[in-house]
Image (tube, rainbow, N blue to C red):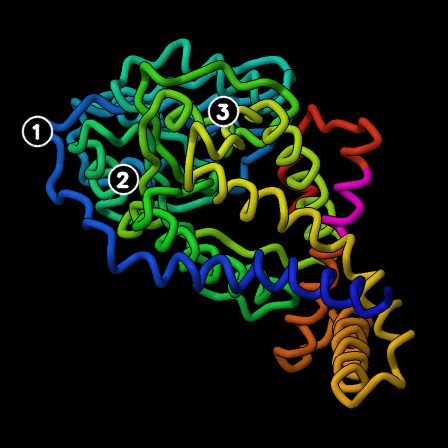
Amino acid sequence: MAETIFWLCLSLPLFACLGYPLLLACCAPFQRPPPSGAPTPPPRVSVIVAAHDEERHIGAKLRSLLDDDYPRERRQIIVASDGSRDATVALARHIAQGNPWDDIRVLDLPRGGKAAALNAAVALAYGEILVFSDADTLWHGDTLRQLIAPFADPRVGASAGNVTIPDGGRALAIGDRVYRAYETWLRRLESRNGCLASADGGLQALRRELFQPVPDDVTDDFFLVTCAPLAGRRIVFAEAARVTDRGVESAQGQFRRRRRITVQGLQSLARRRELLDPARHGLFALALITHKLLRRFAPLLLVPLLASNLWLWGAGGFYRFALLAQLAGYGLALIGLLGRHRRLPRPFRLAACALVTLGAMGVGVWQFLGGYRYRQWNPQQSR
């Protein structure tokens, strides 16, 4: 029995994190490359930025949007402030007044949550393509053109941008950088196989006619992009559409962020459960089950993995090595957490970030199963 538990608890996370991407990598060469080119003429685009107390970021955010080379007469920018108590609205309006040739609208909304802010912004949007981007990410000169390019293919309903962290050297932010690099690799493979299962909230786009109002208890990025497969359209990874983000440096911020994402992500899957049917949605359903469901439940398997490994200490050299490897990993993580205010070598910080992330995901799963839901957001608490 102990051996069965050990191998089950080891193989499922390994498949979700490594076996599944390698399987996609083997299938990718047999897939037809997507058509190249861009929509002509450039479609009208509405860029929506939801913000809550973002006075530190909103100025730089809007300047990076205005510096984008997309034709300004085809671009609308909407800042939806969700009950901001700082100078977010004032700063956004000041920039809007200083750029009268650009269509910038600033909504000063009462506190209602991110979903309510996004829905209110979409109600004012006139673009054929809706673009959603976080307030603390910075665009590059051709971000919007690259993000919109896949829509030249009528089969494409949504596109996902590439969120990068250029400098992850401080505290636990290095873990975010490694995780984003892994997700970029996985999204590239999923997109090539036509089963891209997610997008980063830092940058994504959706055809206006596919939009569905966002509920207040889900991850908005996942809910929005999955409007496309529900309508029989594809999600494409626009890797050249880059925005710059900053990693989460504190253990507390990382824990709160990952816990909230886990609860809302599982609730999103519950609302989109029809997409989990392989008979109807094929490889996309299998991608969701592996990428979004199995990976989130994997942390719960770590405790029985360790317990069964302790029981199997005398069963052979492999089991002794596996136990020592687990204990060494937890030891590195604990040292990394205790010394997180010092500049420890990267393995300690990576292990610490992994332990915090896995612990938060495990807590998030239990909160979800217990009926707890997150309906408000506070971006500053997750940084």
Q: Of callouts 3 and 1, which one flags the residue occurring earlier in the amino acid sequence?
A: 1
Q: Position of residue 278 (x, y in %)?
A: 48, 35
Q: Position of residue 81 (x, y in %)?
A: 53, 22
Q: Is residue 363 magenta?
A: yes
- State the separation of the CA atoms marked 2 and 3: 29 Å
Q: Dot 1 lies on which element?
A: loop
Query: Which residue type does callout 2 highlight?
Result: Leu
Of badges 2 and 3, nearer the viewer stands 2
CB atoms at circles 3 and 1 under 8 Å apart?
Answer: no
Query: Which residue type does callout 3 highlight?
Result: Ala
- The residue singled out by tag 2 in the image is 147
Q: Of callouts 2 and 3, which one flags the residue occurring earlier in the amino acid sequence?
A: 3
Q: Main secondary structure of the magenta part?
A: helix
- State the separation of the CA atoms marked 3 and 1: 36 Å
Q: Which residues are magenta?
A: 359-366
CB atoms at circles 2 and 1 under 8 Å apart?
Answer: no
Q: Position of residue 367 (x, y in %)?
A: 80, 36
- The residue singled out by tag 1 in the image is 40
- Label placed on residue 360: none
Q: Dot 2 lies on which element?
A: helix
- State the separation of the CA atoms marked 2 and 1: 14 Å
